[in-house]
Image (tube, rainbow, N blue to C red):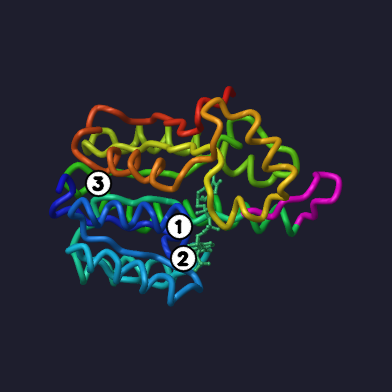
């Protein structure tokens, strides 16, 4: 139980990678806040699964693009568990199109969720992270932020943006013994990958030395390590979890 007595919030944890992270942190003894935007039933399923394994969790609705909802979410978590030690900025979306067909709306929507949401949540939990015992900010980026990817100019920009954001916040939080790191997964078996055409998936697969897509647990284990005391001397880093892809 490496995360006993630690409070963790995982944005966008009703489904996919966020769900896997929330369940892993719960199994490790943390109090977990499961954030969702619209998948209420899925979020309560995650809470039930964590509780069934002896953990403690609550579901909290908030669209990360809405600052008022994010502030209200922080209040709810504070009332339930006190100071938050670990913020995992996981919520993210894709709106894939070749750049020639990408509209300004497609661009803005992805910026608003993937970077605006990170701003709102980090802002809301910043004081918690400073005050917390061994605070941890963990941003979920992507190998696409390192390599670029056809049809994902908007998404790749947001995921690269997290590198600069993480390194800067790491500097600003260091004096509080709080760390900030990025996890850059490769291609992970979730709804997001399911949207990629099969032909393109096969092409991606041929570039992965480990010859498989990542399982959600491959990412969740790394986040558990970052959330724990064991990662205390690591900050401002980007951890690639990509099956050995070059970038
Ligand atoms: N899948 C991959 O191959 C892959 C690879 C590298 C990095 N990533 C990154 O990993 C993260 C999770 O990806 P995923 O594949 O697990 O995605 P996913 O299966 O599509 O799940 C997305 C999650 O984000 C939530 N969400 C979306 N917009 C939100 C908003 N405005 N406010 C609050 N929550 C919101 C969704 O909640 P609702 O269901 O309530 O809408 C859902 O829980 C993303 O940041 C993504 O960029 C994914």
Closer-to-camera residue (85/22)? 22
**Residue shown at 20%/33% (left/top)?**
230
- Residue 221 coordinates in the image, percent (x, y): 33, 42
Which type of secondary structure does the marked residue at label 1 adopt?
A: helix
Residue 130, label in figure: 3
Q: Residues within 10 Å of mark 1 (few under 14, many from 20)?
A: many
- Residue 140 coordinates in the image, percent (x, y): 46, 44
Which type of secondary structure does the marked residue at label 2 adopt?
A: helix
Horizontal placement of 24 versus 104: left or right? Answer: left
Q: Residue 108: which quarter of the image?
A: bottom right
Question: Cβ of disc 2 within 8 Å of ligand 1?
Answer: no
**Residue shown at 34%/38% (left/top)?**
222
- Residue 199 coordinates in the image, percent (x, y): 75, 44
Residue 120, label in figure: 1
Number of numbered discs: 3
Mark found first going from the N terminus, 3 or 2: 2
- Residue 32 coordinates in the image, percent (x, y): 27, 61
Asked if the residue at tag 1 contacts the one at tag 2, i.e. Cβ–Cβ closer than 8 Å, the answer is: yes
**Residue shown at 45%/57% (left/top)?**
120
Real-space CA distance between mark 3 and mark 2, rounded to the nearest whole angstrom = 20 Å
Mark found first going from the N terminus, 3 or 1: 1
Q: Residue 72: which quarter of the image?
A: bottom left
């Amino acid at each position: 139980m490496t995360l006993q007595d630690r409070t963790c919030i995982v944005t966008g944890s009703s489904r996919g990678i966020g769900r896997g992270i929330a369940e892993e942190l719960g199994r490790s003894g943390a109090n977990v806040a499961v954030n969702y935007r619209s998948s209420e039933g899925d979020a309560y399923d995650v809470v039930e699964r964590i509780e069934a394994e002896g953990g403690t969790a609550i579901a909290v609705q908030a669209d990360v693009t809405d600052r008022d909802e994010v502030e209200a979410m922080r209040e709810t978590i504070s009332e339930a568990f006190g100071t938050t030690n670990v913020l995992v900025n996981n919520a993210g979306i894709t709106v894939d199109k070749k750049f020639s067909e990408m509209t300004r709306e497609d661009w803005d929507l992805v910026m608003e969720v993937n970077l605006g949401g990170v701003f709102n949540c980090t802002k809301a939990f910043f004081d918690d992270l400073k005050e917390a015992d061994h605070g941890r900010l963990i941003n979920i980026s992507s190998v696409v932020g390192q390599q670029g990817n056809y049809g994902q100019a908007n998404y790749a920009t947001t995921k690269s943006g997290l590198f600069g954001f993480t390194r800067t916040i790491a500097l600003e939080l260091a004096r509080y013994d709080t760390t900030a790191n990025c996890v850059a997964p490769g291609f992970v078996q979730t709804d997001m990958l399911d949207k990629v055409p099969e032909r393109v998936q096969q092409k991606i697969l041929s570039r992965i030395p480990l010859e498989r897509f990542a399982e959600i647990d491959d990412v969740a284990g790394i986040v558990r390590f970052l959330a724990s005391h064991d990662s205390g001397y690591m900050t401002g880093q980007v951890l690639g979890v990509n099956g050995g892809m070059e970038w």
